[in-house]
Amino acid sequence: MHDGKLPGAVRGGVSANRRRAINVGGVMQLLKYFIQSQQWLSRNFDRLLPGKFRVDGQKDFQDKVVPRYLQRKQVVYDVGGGKRPYLNKETKKRLDLTVIGLDISKDELAKAPEGIYDQQICSDITFFKGEESADLVICQSLLEHIKNVDAAICAISTTLKPGGLALLFLPNKNAFYARLNLLLPQGLKNKALALFYPQMKKKLGFPAYYNKCTPGELKKLAAFYNFSIVEEKYYYNSIYLRFFFPLHLLWRLWLIFFCFISRDQAAETFTFVLKKN
């Protein structure tokens, strides 16, 4: 017979486990506060830099570049948008656009907001051959994940009508984070990003190759596939090293020097607007 209470050893074991859990939780909370303080320092330091070093490239592409090229009744291909297409229902309806989603994953396309895509094409862009039906192709943060960028640019060319535009946003292989990305194992990168930038957790899991993802290399590809460059924009800002201010500071000083000697080739990300001739 016993009094219904757990033996002392078991009670002690539960208590010890609880203490360990509390200790781990406390360490993680301290680490979270430390990272937040470092990010705050990094953001405030960046406010001291010239304006071009503070522009968020992807936000500029989404908010300023793409809207300038949207016109009524266009046929728009969103290449690689998957479940997160660029266009929303309001813009699509207001401009009476036909939107076609092209993505390698059928599941990603199926998760897109209902009614965004008038047509869904599940295909690897490097094997896709279009019918020259598009007025506009939007392709953001995709080319760095493709091994054969030549084939992707060729496919985009077959998708566009003569005079059609391809709006491209991508990271620069010359960027420090891109070089680091190529060196680190994918699993380690995912864990680090989830720890330092939990808001990016849903965007993890896609290996990056950065094949021909420099401004100079992409210009050569554009010329080869009979595109002319309508607009090019370069951005010198990224968030990846903000988790530790001393490292962020060193990177910023290096970037300023790199920009001075290499100009556009030093950009962290860049945008090209290409016109099919």
Image: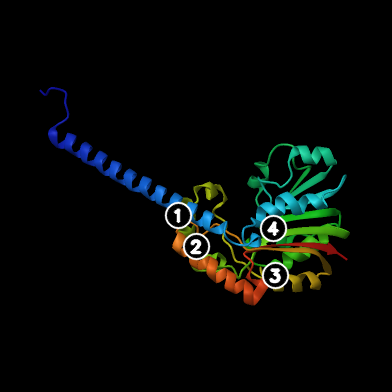
Q: Which callout, 4 or 2, points at the residue further toward the start of the chain? A: 4
Q: What element does badge 4 sit on? A: loop
| Rendered image quadrant of residue 159 | bottom right
Q: Earlier in the sequence, mark 1 or mark 4?
A: 1
- Colouring scheme applied when the structure was drawn: rainbow
Residue at image mark 2: 248
- Asked if marks 3 and 2 touch (Cβ < 8 Å), the reply is no
In the figure, is residue 238 to the left or right of 100?
Answer: left
- Marks 3 and 2, how far apart at CA: 24 Å
Residue 215 badge: 3
Place of residue 21 in the rendered image (x, y in percent of width and height, measured from the top left): 29, 42
Q: Is residue 129 left or right of residue 47?
A: right
Dot 3 alpha-carbon crowd within 10 angstroms: few under 14, some 14 to 19, many 20 or more:
many
Q: Are marks 1 and 2 in contact (CB under 8 Å)?
A: yes
Query: Label 1's element?
Result: helix
Q: Is residue 30 left or right of residue 209?
A: left
- Is label 1 in contact with label 4 (beta carbons under 8 Å)? no
Secondary structure beneath label 2: helix
Which residue is nearer to you in this view: 11 or 70?
70
Q: Say which quarter of the image contains residue 143.
A: bottom right
